[in-house]
Image (tube, helix red, strand yellow):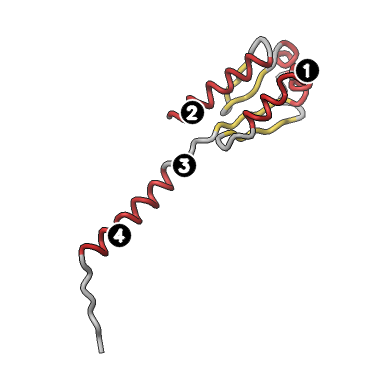
Amino acid sequence: MIIFFTVGKDFNTVRNVKIVKRLTKIFSKTKKTQIDFCEKNLDRFLTDENSSNYNDFLNQKSIIFKEYSCQSKCELCKKSPYAMVNGEFVAADNSDELLEKLKQIATNNLKE
């Protein structure tokens, strides 16, 4: 015995909504910003006064960060605070200025 069911418009509408929701989840994920630090550079330039600001920023969902013992940029590392952001070198005159640059880059990444 074969039983046939009629699929009405309501079923297709529900199905289409589910498909759209899945596609939205897949393609609208928050773009992450990858930030890599040299541990020695952080030790040299990060101060107690601004370390909590860095922690707050780096613990955001859109930020992925790693600390490396060395990134082989020793000449630049000695001169100023820096980070590698999505593979690009970003430096500043001081650690507060670097944090502001990192925040701006992360904000721009979210808009893209």
Q: CA distance from mark 3 to mark 2?
A: 12 Å
* Earlier-in-chain disc, 4 versus 3: 4
Numbered disc 3: secondary structure:
loop
* Residue 14: assigned label: 4
Callout 2, which amino acid?
Asn
Along the line of sight, the residue nearer the viewer: 1 or 9: 9
Report the amino acid beneath label 3: Lys
Q: Which residue is mark 1?
A: 44
Give the distance between the C-alpha atoms of the residues marked 1 and 4, in whole angstroms. 58 Å
- Residue 7 horizontal side relative to residue 76, left or right: left
Identify which residue is drawn at 54% across, 35% down.
32
Mark earlier in primary sequence (2, 1): 1
Residue 108 higher or lower than 75, as above or below: below
Q: Which quadrant of the rendered structure holds the C terminus?
A: top left
Per the model, the C-alpha gap separating discs 4 and 3 is 23 Å
* Number of residues whose C-alpha sits closer than 10 Å to that of mark 4, classed few (under 14), some (14–19) or many (20 or more): few
Q: Please tell me the numbered disc located at residue 29.
A: 3
Residue drawn at the location 74% of the way across and 19% of the way down: 49
Drawn side of residue 109 relative to residue 22, left or right: right
Looking at the image, residue 25 lies above or below residue 101:
below
